[in-house]
Amino acid sequence: MKYTALKGVHDIFPPDVYVWQKVETTAKEVFSVYGFHEIRVPIMESTDIFIRSIGETSDIVEKEMYTFPDKANRSITLRPEGTAPVVRSFIENHLYNQPSPQKFFYSGPMFRYERPQKGRFRQFYQIGVEAFGVSEARLDAEIISMLKLFLERLGLTELNFEVNSIGCEKCRPDYKKALIDFFPDKVGGLCPDCNRRYTQNPLRILDCKVAACIELRKGAPQVINYLCIDCKEHFEEFQSLLRLLNVTYIINPNMVRGLDYYTRTTFEVTSEHLGSQKAVAAGGRYDRLVEEFGGPPTPAIGFAIGMERLVEILKTHNSTFRTPAPGAFLATIGNDAGRESLKIAEKLRSKGITVELGYEGASLKSQMRKADKLGANYVFIIGEDELKSGKIKWKNLKDGSQGEVGIKEIEGFMV
RNA sequence: GUGAGCGUAGCUCAAUGGUUAGAGCAUUGGACUGUGGCUCCAAGGGUUGGGGGUUCGAGUCCCCUCGCUCACCCCA
């Protein structure tokens, strides 16, 4: 094959594209009921926007960004995630001067230079939401509830909601220290990756999958026990509201997010139907990011849904996504009938009926076959006899019934 | 970046180192010169991912390369 798509990118075409459309329209419907409005931001930004938000030492920045110089030698990066561009837009357009909270959703492609595997791609799509200006836990609970409703609307009820709090800039240092103090005599037994984590980012030891590390970290201090008063109250209120809203959740004290900007509430929605990358949606609070970006102190929270992962789950749950079938198929015999069929097709289409035609002088039999394969409801047969009499034959392909209808009455017949 | 597995028709897969690489499904046409589905017949479709090597002979064995997949790191 001479021309192929790049590694880790994919085409989306029927019937799958109808699953995607369903997800996108459902998101818009649900999110708008919660007062979220669409925001459209560029897919490329100045590189430093991502470096400052995601964190200089994060894997995304260190090795996964699509970064290149433009013709004026500015460093440009294809967005690896959606929060930073939205925060940039929020500040640049002074949206903090609008009534608080400001709530946005977006959807579109993200780019990360990684080795593809199940549920992971170089160009992938996210639907995300961001809410600015409210720190109270009611908003956290609302957002989780909104995510749950969205998933339920898509028929997904067997997903796991995992929550955690990773504290704030006040309490996290204490916890980090406690964690470091816990491991010294155990470091030798940890896997090589965890040895590296021990010095670079000890929190990451908590979600290592190596059996020895899982064993060794038993009894390790949990971040929940090191939260400051404010963070602790916030987390407890958050949980109490989740129960109030009947959201079934589990606390995952080992859940640590990979992006540096998170504070307090973090959460993930996971599925058993995915591979190793089982998070279908994830997010959390980032109360400091707007200020660090040069905006006014503004608490915020958001999440992102992985479209490919969500579509994967939907396809295993629900096989009813099909390419829409035409309402009518016009089978014609001869040039005159072919010309007449164009007029009829346009009339029906103007009424919103999907119409397909037979082409290339195919035999009636093969046109019938095609109509059947397309799943058409009705076939109209137009030949010399029909042109003379002004009545065309119809056949209902679902029940096999057939009859005649005047050419002028065909719209009424179909509508 | 690391590791493993796999590359034969559009798809799913056959073919002991030995003739012209086959089958099912799918596509197109026909059996009915104006009636779909079921059945039957036929046709099109392949540089066996690519390159090199061993051999009288390679889809099959060896090397390289590219691609895909899964996993690790990390993440939606």
Image (tube, coloured by chain):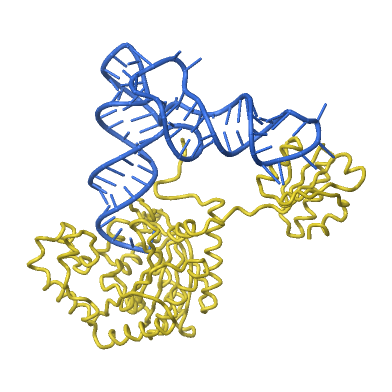
Q: Position of residue A304 (x, y in %)?
A: 42, 67
Q: Is residue B30 above or below residue A111?
A: above
The hue of chain A in the figure is yellow
A57 relative to A22 in the view: left or right: left
Q: Nearer the viewer, residue A364 or B16?
A: B16
Where, by quadrant of the figure, is residue A183 drawn?
A: bottom left
Residue drawn at x 46%, y 35% as measured from the top left: A1
Q: Position of residue B19 (x, y in %)?
A: 44, 14
Q: Is residue B13 above or below residue A20?
A: above
Q: Nearer the viewer, residue A250 or A20?
A: A250
The hue of chain B in the figure is blue
- Locate the C terminus of chain A by quadrant: bottom right
Where, by quadrant of the figure, is residue A145 drawn?
A: bottom left
Q: Is residue A279 above or below residue A331?
A: below
Q: Nearer the viewer, residue A62 or A340?
A: A340
A210 relative to A400 in the view: left or right: left
Q: Position of residue A342 (x, y in %)?
A: 79, 47
A397 relative to A305 in the view: left or right: right
Q: Nearer the viewer, residue A127 or B70?
A: B70
A315 relative to A238 in the view: left or right: right
Q: Position of residue A169 (x, y in %)?
A: 25, 79
Single out the residue that lies furthest toward the right: A389
